[in-house]
Amino acid sequence: MDPRSASIVAPASSGRVIAAGTAWLAVYVAARWAVALGDLADVARLAAAFMPLFAFYWFVAVVRRELRNADELQRQVQLEALALAFPTSMVVLMTLGLMEIFHGGRLDLPLKDAWVALPMIYGVCLAAVRYRYR
Amino acid sequence: MRSDVRERRQQREWSQADLAEKLGVSRQTINAIETGKYSPSLELAFKIARLFKVRVEDIFEP
């Protein structure tokens, strides 16, 4: 028996990935709150502003570890989900950008938060691909 | 790709989880192979054939 089989039984989006994603989201919300407080020193605000990056790096490390244990179908699902999510994200972000250009910047779209759409699109694409192989 | 993995598994009274454990893959992968939604890699196809003690072409059909 393959010694890795015990860790292969669960799909790649196991509890560890969800926990790491939730932890990163909590750090992000806390960082935004800390930066918005305004009465922190510049260095502390800078540290708080970039804290989500470190949390996200940890999240990526957890995902990489899970993917190493994933089997060939799970890897194919991830690859197809990314292949679908990338052009979909391009379309969404391009649409927002073109709308902003068309309206001469008057729409004031929250583009600094546009990245939030990327994991959401990826999640939808992942669910769609998983459904196909169900 | 068509295969008779399900028939051979059922003949041995193995569940999908049993076969998945023997092959070192997830149960979802076994299900996808049995329903023809996923074509396994050569490596996995040979593993399956070896497990059932037959040739690859006896199990899989393009």
Image (cartoon, coloured by chain):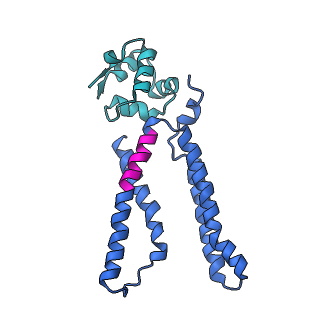
Residue positioned most to the left? B62
Q: Looking at the image, is A111 positioned above or below residue A59?
A: below
**Apparent side of residue A38 relative to residue B9 in the rendered image (left or right):** right
Residue B47 picture quarter: top left
- The residue drawn where x is 37% and y is 84% is A107
Query: Quadrant where the C terminus of chain B lies?
Result: top left
Residue B47 is a magenta residue = no
**Apparent side of residue A41 relative to residue A120 in the rendered image (left or right):** right
Relative depth, front residue between A58 and B9 = A58
Q: Where is residue B32 in the image (x, y as percent from the top left)?
A: 37, 34
Q: Position of residue B56 (x, y in %)?
A: 36, 18
Query: Quadrant where the N terminus of chain B lies?
Result: top left
Q: Where is residue B4 in the image (x, y as percent from the top left)?
A: 32, 21
Q: Looking at the image, is A134 positioned above or below residue A107?
A: above
Count of numbered badges drawn on the protein = 0
**Apparent side of residue A3 relative to residue A82 in the rendered image (left or right):** right
Q: Give the range drawn in magenta.
A: A74-85
Q: Chain A appears what colour? A: blue
Q: Position of residue A126 (x, y in %)?
A: 41, 51
Residue A79 is a magenta residue = yes
| Secondary structure mostly seen in the magenta stretch | helix
Residue A7 picture quarter: top right
Give the cyan chain's letter: B
- The residue drawn where x is 50% and y is 41% is A11
**Apparent side of residue A120 relative to residue A42 in the rendered image (left or right):** left
- The residue drawn where x is 70% and y is 81% is A42
